[in-house]
Amino acid sequence: MTGFRGAHVLITGAACGLGRLLALEAVRRGGRVTLLDRDASGLDRVCEEIRALAGEAAAFVVDIADKVALQATCRDVLATRGGVDILINNAGIVTGKLLLECSDDDIERTFQVNALAGFWTVRAFLPGMLAVGRGHIVTVASAAGLAGTSRLVDYCASKFAAVGFDEALRLELKRLGSPIQTTLVCPYFIDTGMFEGARTRFAWLLPILDADRVVQRILGAVEGNRARLVMPRFVLSVLLARLLPPTVFDALLGFFGVNRSMDAFVGRH
């Protein structure tokens, strides 16, 4: 079991949305949190909420798309806050555009935030975990890392990368005989505002997920050392559907409305 009480929990993308809720719940469970985000005012608000809970938090303003800045911030965290027990790579961005509407910068930033930042944080904090013989790495990916869809080409590709990162890292740690745990999180759309306007055809099968409930399930999965958390369970059916010919697979995604789910997307403002 992975316990939060007394643990040093680092969360990226912590100024709003899911990251904010993860930080608050980690504090309620007894953790001391370190928050990373580029939104300074947002981090200040979250820290105020944590202080109201009599919790301990430290905020570091950094654009995690900037590798050099992120690596420097990780060094600052180690120097001032100590080693990390639970690393939650939560930060994510979405453009919601057709591929030809995305700029080069859009595509590069999507990968920098959604995929590459996880490499830099893990490389920074994993050595400390290995030294003490404990730790937990959480990768918040997406159902979009299991199945692609229109208007999410860059996002899906980056989340597929995050899924592959978690899987290969998990196997590498096992090969090394390490006790470090990993948890991959693949949720469908969550009602944080990040995917505002996204729709689902069959809400009883693919509901827009309640953020508070998602947070409880993520931290519960961490505490239970679950290797993978997919929400809702119906998303797991895509793993079986991949055995079908592409034409059939595509037709199924069309029938369940997945390939038109982003048609009315507006995103967070």
Image (cartoon, grey):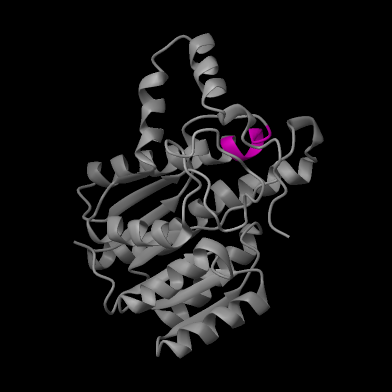
The answer to whether one can see residue 37 in this image is: yes
- 172 on left or right of 101: left
**Looking at the image, which residue is at 53% across and 21% down?**
255
> Which quadrant, please, contains the C terminus?
bottom right
The picture places residue 86, in percent across and down from the top left corner, at 35, 65
Residue drawn where x is 23% and y is 52% of the image: 178
Residue pictured at 37% horizontal, 47% vertical: 184
Q: Quadrant of the N terminus?
A: bottom left
> Residue 267: image x %, image y %?
69, 51
In the image, the segment drawn in magenta is 151-156
Q: Quadrant of residue 69?
A: bottom right
Whether residue 83 is visible, yes or no, is no
Left or right: residue 119 versus residue 82 is right
Res 154 quadrant in image: top right
The mark tally for this picture is 0
Q: Is residue 36 magenta?
A: no
Q: Is residue 47 above or below residue 260?
A: below
Question: Is 218 situated above or below 49?
Answer: above
**As drawn, 208 above or below 216:** above
| Residue 155 lies in the magenta-colored region | yes
**Residue at 51% across, 56% down:** 120
Is 140 or 206 nearer to us in this picture?
206
Main SS of the magenta part reads helix
Percent x, y of residue 27: 38, 78
Image coordinates of residue 72 in percent, x first then y, are 58, 69
